[in-house]
């Protein structure tokens, strides 16, 4: 892609109405554009990152048997009344048609997926079943000032599992945990597995939390053992500690730290919570009617993008991990090196390398600054000096080391 | 994919509340499930078809310079007031938050894309520009009884082009026409390029119409020359003719037929219609302020899926063209041939062939009937007889010819 043709140029200054680091960086880099508070357009670079994140999620969901579906945004009021959430779900958007029909805009899909499963699940032979979707969700957040970390309209993957027993649900729940760990690892994030409230139906749910200064959650985390709990469930003596303070881990007795974090995933053992209102049952091998046990597993894919921007960035700009970067290489031509740079561009593209090629007629300072801000993993600079030697400068975004090498050597490194 | 594990089994009878052929077939085949009138869940098979259609659209949009973005569903009221459509767009869903904010649920995105472009387009050097998205759209249709052909919530690709002159817009408009022709060709549909109302801003717009009995549009189409007009713009003498009647082509004098059709794509030269209200201008090479000329180009991807189901089907079921079929091969094991069928399955999958493998313990009649209903392009049957000879039966959905051949021969045919 030629940078001069790319829609969504970098901005020198962050928009005045953006307070959060992720929104400031993503807006400046040309990844997103705010339409309203908590509502963003994904520009071409942002759409590429989001697609890559969502495809990683797809791969890991398929690896644990997930079948992709696409449920509607508009959901019938009666389903939400059936679960008691029409009046209780405080961020639910409600839409009324002129003919009086009322629908909810899906903030989550238990009210659709449970009655859907009921239409196809009859016997134990139809279980277990794992259905997921990746879709735009809606929540009427009163305060949506944290960029992609808290949107009114946001992207989410939600997986629902259906089981013939609690034991089977528990075994799959552990598998899902591992799939989630893989996803966060692949997108370059260190996510803490955190115990959180299980609601009325389970002792705990689990959250995947990433330590971020601007995070809205508070965690009590032991760096020695695996103890990590959300503030909402910690014991009274831990709850006295504030962010930045240290305490004693109730599990191993070592150092406990209190940190701010943002939730990037959460998983619940729903058990019969949504099966009961929709009478989602099955016939077991003895012909007896049993209740289907459900689990649900969410990842906010746009929030994940915001979290990566928040965590993997420095004073110069973004630092995308290779698996989610919109392009792998930022090719920059300086001085009068365009003819040679064009040659490099065509060779890289022919070799299947994803390249963003800055061929604009502007200063080296602007171009190299933009390369740091956009934050692709690798930078290839062609200058009059390197062109004279038939060479390029190769530099990783995460390193200061610059190598002056030939195109062939560059290709060898890039096409592994 | 093993059929026994696939979510969304075939139904013997079409749901009683489905009147349209496309919805009946897609529901029976396990592709979609109706949640409310005009609102469908895409089951795993349906999601695969939709994804393939949308990826074809992506490829053809990229081929004419389209850059993919993702705009929000929720759109500020003030943008719709600015274009005069807040009160005039009769199928607009409006949502009111508790705090009084009012937003529209996007039925189309001129009100977002024009002010978005304004933020990045300054000079003639920023033009032309081609932005598209593939996204869920919302229209509060009073009558939504035609399955995927008229949804309240549906999938759509919308491309918007931005130009420095009407001539440049017109040239791109012709390019987009050709890209559309390629898309409909690739998904197996014969689409008629039809002149339709251009609104207040152009003489004509163009629709791509597919002849379908249940179609909501009426076309006057000459089978000899290229004349094709929508009823809404034909002359009074043509307008007297009814569907099924013949007339005289006003262009070439040959036979004109009056047919029912469904619109699968439409393209408009918007010119300054949306640039003006949002003051979308640019500085030309003389430093003069000029108005950006816009075009818009829509394809309903879910409606396309419904149209394919409606047109490419017979009394036995669906008949997917290869490029959009959820799987390429329907492998069926009959009798006690499972061990050999398993071997065939693994060989096909290893060779990269997309296979749906019906290994259920049920009758040949049910399995072969389901294969016809699901409608994959090729059927591979393994029976006791073929297994004894290390062979399979290969049959195309569109042909009665059955070939008895070895696995290797099958692979040679399938992996081209």
Image: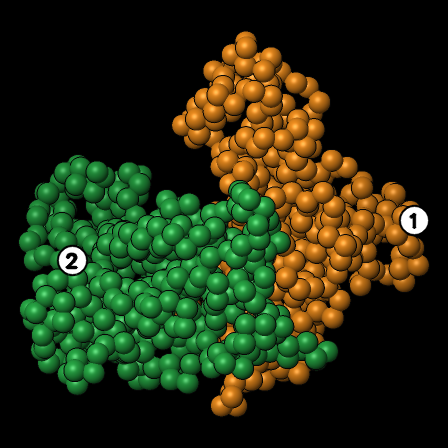
Chain colours: A green, B orange
Give the quarter of the image for residue B333.
Answer: top right
Kindly identify which residue carries mark 1: B245
Q: Residue furthest bottom?
A: B100
Whether residue A311 appears in this view of the structure is no
Residue B226 appearing in the image: yes
Residue drawn at x 47%, y 53% as measured from the top left: A162
Q: Is residue A27 above or below residue A271?
A: below
* Screen quadrant of the C terminus of chain A: top left
Task: Out of A65 and B76, give the one closest to the viewer.
Answer: A65
- Answer whether labels 2 and 1 touch (C-beta < 8 Å): no
Residue B327 against residue B199 in the figure, above or below: above
Above or below, A115 relative to B222: below
Pointer 2 local density, CA inside 10 Å: few below 14, some 14–19, many at least 20 = many
Q: Viewer-proximal residue, B166 or B53?
A: B53
Q: Chain of mark 1?
A: B
In the rendered image, residue A136, in percent from the top left (x then y), is placed at 47, 65
Q: Residues within 10 Å of mark 1 (few under 14, many from 20)?
A: few
Q: Position of residue A194 (x, y in %)?
A: 25, 66
Secondary structure found at label 1: loop
Which residue: 56% across, 56% down?
A281
Subunit under mark 2: A
Q: Residue at x 52, y 23 (%)?
A: B338
Left or right: residue A256 versus residue B193 is: left
Please, what secondary structure does the residue beneath circle 2 have? loop
Q: Disc 2 designates what residue?
A: A397
What is the number of the mark on residue A149? none
* Dots 2 and 1 on the same chain: no
Which of the 4 image quadrants contains residue A296? bottom left
Residue at point 68% right, 37% down?
B373
Which one is in front, A97 or B116?
A: A97
Distance (Cα) linking label 2 and label 1: 69 Å
């Amino acid at each position: 892609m030629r940078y001069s043709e790319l829609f969504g140029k970098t901005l020198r200054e962050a928009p005045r109405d953006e307070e959060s680091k992720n929104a400031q960086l993503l807006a400046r880099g040309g990844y997103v554009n705010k339409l309203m508070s908590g509502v963003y357009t994904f520009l071409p670079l942002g759409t590429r990152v989001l697609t890559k994140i969502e495809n990683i999620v797809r791969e890991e969901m398929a690896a644990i048997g997930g079948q992709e579906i696409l449920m509607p945004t508009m959901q019938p009021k009666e389903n939400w009344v059936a679960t008691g959430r029409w009046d209780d779900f405080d961020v639910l958007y409600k839409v009324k048609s002129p003919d009086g029909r009322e629908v909810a805009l899906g903030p989550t899909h238990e009210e659709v997926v449970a009655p859907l499963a009921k239409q196809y699940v009859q016997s134990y032979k139809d279980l277990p079943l794992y259905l997921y979707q990746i879709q735009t969700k809606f929540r009427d957040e009163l305060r949506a000032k944290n960029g992609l970390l808290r949107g009114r309209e946001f992207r989410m993957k939600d997986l629902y599992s259906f089981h013939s027993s609690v034991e089977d649900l528990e075994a799959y729940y552990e598998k899902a945990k591992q799939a989630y760990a893989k996803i966060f690892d692949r997108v370059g994030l260190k996510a803490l597995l955190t115990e959180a409230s299980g609601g009325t139906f389970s002792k705990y749910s689990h959250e995947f939390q990433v330590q971020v200064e601007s995070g809205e959650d508070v965690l009590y985390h032991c760096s020695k053992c695996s103890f990590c709990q959300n503030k909402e469930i910690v014991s009274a003596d831990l709850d006295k500690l504030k962010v930045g303070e240290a305490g004693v881990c109730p599990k191993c007795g070592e150092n406990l730290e209190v940190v701010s974090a943002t939730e990037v995933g959460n998983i619940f053992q729903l058990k019969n919570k949504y099966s009961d209102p929709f009478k989602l049952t099955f016939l077991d091998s003895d012909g007896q009617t049993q209740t289907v046990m459900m689990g649900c597993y969410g990842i906010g894919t746009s929030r994940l993008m915001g979290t990566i921007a928040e965590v993997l960035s420095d004073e110069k700009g973004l630092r995308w991990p290779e698996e989610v970067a919109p392009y792998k290489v930022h090719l920059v031509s300086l001085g009068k090196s365009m003819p040679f740079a064009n040659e490099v561009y065509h060779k890289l593209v022919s070799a299947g390398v994803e390249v963003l090629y800055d061929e604009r007629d502007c200063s080296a300072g602007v171009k190299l600054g933009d390369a740091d801000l956009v934050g692709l993993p690798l930078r290839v600079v062609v200058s009059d000096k390197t062109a004279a030697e038939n060479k390029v400068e190769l530099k990783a975004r995460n390193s200061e080391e610059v190598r002056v090498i030939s195109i062939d050597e560059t290709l060898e490194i890039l096409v592994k």
